[in-house]
Amino acid sequence: MTITEIKDKIIEHGIEPFPGSINQIEELKSYLNINYLPSVYIDFLQQMGNGTRNGFLQGHSCFFNELPNLKKWAIELLIENNSNLALTSNDFVFWMSQGYMFTFFKIDEGDDPPVYFYTEISNPLNFIKISETLSEFFTRLALNDKELFKI
């Protein structure tokens, strides 16, 4: 599904998305000192970057109010778990849940990049690719795919 199709689907289920603005996206890029974000991710931010009401992604850290801190929190999580893994300047952490797992994409892997995952539960030796594309990741979240985070 495209981000627009996901947005339409959640609206059908009574969930209200709060869109983000181009200005917020530019401020985020400036704050994080990055020049590029994938088009699928920009679409997500424009359609629901300021959160939702009544469901989808509520309780997860993935909206403008927390995005500036996600990479810092992810790095802290890796350190707390004595992980040998490290995030690079090319890695963009865009989702975190309950402070014990996070996802990221690599900025240079295209407009619909693969999604990588870390969880302290298994403390893996490598980051795990859990989705071939960012749009697939959001689709699977919207469909409540219970297999998405099983590793």
Image: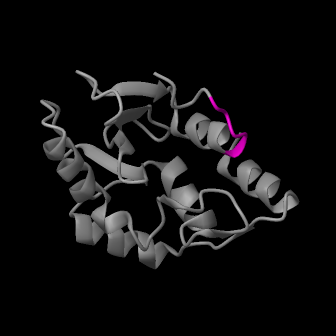
- Residue drawn 73% across and 40% down? 143
Q: Main secondary structure of the magenta part?
A: loop
Task: Give left or right: position of 130 versus 10.
Answer: left
Task: Give left or right: position of 68 versus 24.
Answer: left
Foreground of the two, 34 or 116: 116
Quadrant of residue 128 within the rendered picture = top left
- Residue drawn 35% across and 46% down? 100
* Position in image of residue 78 (x %, y %): 20, 42
* Position in image of residue 25 (x %, y %): 42, 69
Q: How many marks?
A: 0
Q: Where the N terminus falls, by quadrant?
A: top right
Task: Give left or right: position of 65 versus 21.
Answer: left
* Position in image of residue 129 (x %, y %): 41, 25
Q: Is residue 40 magenta?
A: no
- Residue drawn 57% across and 57% down? 43
The range drawn in magenta is 142-146
Residue 88 visible? The answer is no
Q: Where the C terminus falls, by quadrant?
A: top left
* Position in image of residue 33 (x %, y %): 21, 63
Foreground of the two, 68 or 146: 146
- Residue drawn 64% across and 32% down? 146
**Residue 54 position (above or below residue 112):** below
For the rendered model, the colour scheme is: one colour
Q: Is residue 144 magenta?
A: yes
Foreground of the two, 40 or 102: 102
**Residue 79 position (above or below residue 127):** below
